[in-house]
Image: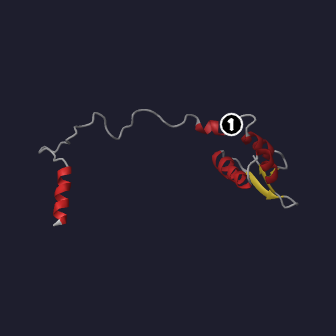
Amino acid sequence: MATARIWAAIQRLVPELPPDGTSVQGSRDKDPRQGNGRDTARQNAKETANIAREDSKKAEVLALMRRSKGATLAEIMEKTAWQAHTVRGFVSGTLIKKLGLAVESFRTDQKERCYRITN
């Protein structure tokens, strides 16, 4: 009984199709699989990813890590005012994954974590 009332209400909401099977709304002029013709991807994204602005924290960290002895976690934290987890995320996400740099992580004799760019 309640099901019949609900079904009747739903059928009133759905428009009936004409007998020839065409859509009630009409047809599109364009093929729906075709886009609007614009390329929305960032141009030269791969080329600009490796460039760090001068005097940015990214440039400072890269300069520290390109030294022959690398940079300790404490040095990077002091230079950038970042916390340790932010430095580790920057190294993993930005330097290794996005920029594709080879980063060596090691401990010094004083048991400090160091990072060095090897290429």
Furthest residue in direction left, as rendered: 19
Please state if 103 lies on the left or on the right of 3 as rendered.
right
Q: Quadrant of residue 25?
A: top left
Q: Which residue is mark 1?
A: 51
Please state if 27 lies on the left or on the right of 111 as rendered.
left
Q: Is residue 89 above or below residue 57?
A: below
Residue at horizontal 24 percent and vertical 37 percent from the top: 27
Q: Is residue 46 above or below residue 96?
A: above
Crowding at dot 1, Cα within 10 Å, few <14 / some 14-19 / many 20+, comes out as few
Residue at horizontal 67 percent and vertical 39 percent from the top: 50
Observer-nearest of 118 and 78: 78
Q: How many marks?
A: 1
Q: Quadrant of residue 52?
A: top right
Please state if 116 lies on the left or on the right of 44 as rendered.
right
Residue 19 at what x, y percent from top left? Answer: 11, 45
What's the amino acid at mark 1?
Ile
Furthest residue in direction bottom, as rendered: 1
Q: Quadrant of residue 110?
A: bottom right
Residue at horizontal 79 percent and vertical 41 percent from the top: 63
Residue at horizontal 48 percent and vertical 36 percent from the top: 40
Element type at mark 1: loop
Observer-nearest of 40 and 86: 86
Residue 38 at what x, y percent from top left? Answer: 44, 32
Observer-nearest of 52 and 56: 56
Residue 49 at what x, y percent from top left? Answer: 64, 39
Point out the image quarter for the N terminus.
Answer: bottom left
Q: Is residue 110 above or below residue 41?
A: below
Residue 87 at what x, y percent from top left? Answer: 72, 51
